[in-house]
Amino acid sequence: MKLLKHFFNFYIDSSIHVSLSVCCLQAMIMIKYCSSINNNLLYFTFFSSLLAYNFIKYFKFIIDNYNNISYKIKVIIVISIFSFLSAFFFTFYLSLYEIVLVSFAGIITFLYAIPTFLISNYNLRATKGLKIYLVALVWTLITVLLPLQFYKDLGLLFILLIFIQIFIYVLIVIIPFEIRDIDIDDTRLSTIPQKIGIRNTKILGFIMILFFLLIEFLKIKLNVIDNLSLDIFIISFLMIFLIINSKKRQSKFYSSFWVEGIPVLWVLLLLF
């Protein structure tokens, strides 16, 4: 049991779970709206996401503690190097458009983690009120726009609607993390719970879920899709449940596993 717990901790801490979630969100888009499933693109998304998250989480720590890092961090470094090599390999399967989009998302990720003179030695992550929207933007770029050439003939309107819908989805699922970290985050970040409180943040989350659902109805009205999918309602109710039960003192895995794992369930719903 103890060994299983250590493995599970490593699974979360090494960013494998969050990378799987990004990959599954992209897979969900492909299953529902694309003419085919591009496995090479999914592999690239998984490995590049794993590399990006570990870079954000551990780069500064490794630089500051280069001569005194644990075995666990060393293994994560090895995994990250393997992810870099794998992502580089699958880059050769990307189109020019996909490479340009990935490069743009990569620049945002780099500036998110590394301070630059443009923002007075603060990285974009530390810029007041910006963090949650940058995360949502990068997730949406990768999951919605990266498979662009594989969409069925649904037009620009569909792309815009699904982009907004997934952007809202990512903002919603970040809320439990923001609530968890309200006392940990620097007040200069000006996160949503820091600005309006936990109760009002949850209300805002419920409003965003309503807009998430309304976009689905709008797709039908504009003949983008034929009918409502059951998965949308299941995911919406799950997000409501998770936001209601979000609190400052939550288990390590509440947000990092259950909330982050919603796209995994989403794909399973579509498959089974």
Image: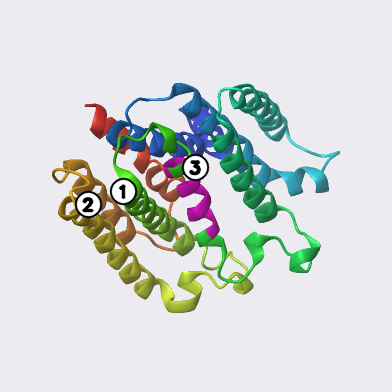
Q: Is residue 140 within the magenta segment?
A: yes
Name the image quarter holding the C terminus: top left
Q: CA distance from mark 3 to mark 2?
A: 21 Å
Q: CA distance from mark 2 to mark 1?
A: 7 Å
Residue under the point 13% across and 44% down: 227
Q: Earlier in the sequence, mark 3 or mark 2?
A: 3
**Which residue carries the number 2 mark?**
219
Residue under the point 43% across and 50% down: 255
Local secondary structure at mark 2: helix
Instruction: Using the image as rendered, state which of residue 245 and residue 222 is in the foreground.
Output: 222
Q: Which mark is residue 142?
A: 3
Q: Residues within 10 Å of mark 2 (few under 14, many from 20)?
A: some
**Residues rendered magenta in the picture:** 134-144
Q: Is residue 266 within the magenta segment?
A: no
Q: Residues within 10 Å of mark 1 (few under 14, many from 20)?
A: some
Name the front one of labels 1 and 3.
Answer: 1
**Which residue carries the number 1 mark?**
158
Q: Amino acid at mark 1?
A: Phe
Q: Earlier in the sequence, mark 1 or mark 3?
A: 3
Which image quadrant for residue 215?
bottom left
Instruction: Using the image as rendered, state which of residue 151 and residue 271 is in the foreground.
Output: 151
At which x and y percent is residue 250? 43, 55
Query: Is the Cβ of the residue at disc 2 closer than 8 Å to that at disc 1?
Result: yes
